[in-house]
Image (spheres, rainbow, N blue to C red):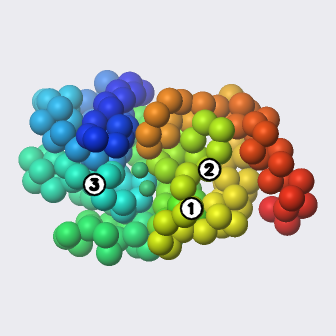
Amino acid sequence: MEIKKLEVGGFENNCYILTCPRAHESIIIDPAAEADRILHEVEGRNVKYILLTHGHRDHIGALEEVRITTGAPVGIHAEDAQALKKVPDFFLKDGQTLTCGEYSIKVLHTPGHSPGGVCFQMGKILFSGDTIFPNGPGNTSIPRADAQIILESIHLKIFVLPDDTIIYPGHGLETTVGREKATPFYLSTRRRTGNQV
Ligand SMILES: [Zn+2]
Ligand SMILES: [Zn+2]
């Protein structure tokens, strides 16, 4: 699988384009902004899906343009779907598997930053949206976010993955599951929260 990361827009969002070179099939994750750059990247390929990690405005700025031009179906978790101008083509569900050529991508529902936040897992690669970043979780001081729920999502859905799983977040640089588990933030929250997660 080829992974192309495009940093787009004023909030330095990461749009990821996954391509199976044998099948010439691609998936676009979070068409956040700068539709022309995203569309240039997928020229001549079959875009199978447009997948959204969540419904926040900074992640969907180029959605309509990319959707119209590619004709690809849009998937988002039902809990975040009201953020979209148009009804999505399908709802993402926890544990669901999608395919792109020879590869399969698993949907992990990871609420906390938003109720319908999801991550996409492809082997030892995780596209985490705004759920987890280097050195801590995503922002929970916003409407519909919950600091306790995001910790549960991270411990139950992400920290159970192999330590060498690479995390590609919705903004900024990559990290790994092992590196995050060992950061002071999670070591201290684990002490505070005991074994409830
Ligand atoms: Zn967000
Ligand atoms: Zn964001």
Point out the frontmost of discs 2 and 3.
2
Q: Label 2's element?
A: strand
Crowding around mark 3 (Cα neighbors within 10 Å: few <14, some 14 to 19, many 20+) is many
Q: CA distance from mark 2 to mark 1?
A: 8 Å
Residue at 50%, 57% (x, y): give it.
118
Q: Quadrant of residue 170?
A: top left
Q: CA distance from mark 1 to mark 3?
A: 19 Å
Q: Which residue is mark 2?
A: 137
Q: Which residue is mark 1?
A: 140
Percent of width and height locating residue 44: 13, 30
Residue 117 at least partly seen? yes
Q: Label 1's element?
A: loop
Percent of width and height locating residue 70: 14, 46
Point out the frontmost of discs 1 and 3.
1
Residue 72 at least partly seen? no
Mark 2–mark 1 CB contact (< 8 Å): yes
Residue at 69%, 58% (x, y): give it.
151
Mark 2 or mark 3, earlier in chain? 3
The correct choice, above or below, for 103 with respect to 61 in the image is above
Mark 1–mark 3 CB contact (< 8 Å): no
The correct choice, above or below, for 172 with respect to 68 in the image is above
Q: Amino acid at mark 1?
A: Thr
Q: Is residue 11 left or right of residue 189?
A: left
Residue at 24%, 57% (x, y): give it.
73
Which image quarter is the C terminus in? Answer: bottom right
Q: Amino acid at mark 3?
A: Ile
Q: CA distance from mark 2 to mark 3?
A: 21 Å
Q: Which residue is mark 3?
A: 60
Mark 1 or mark 3, earlier in chain? 3
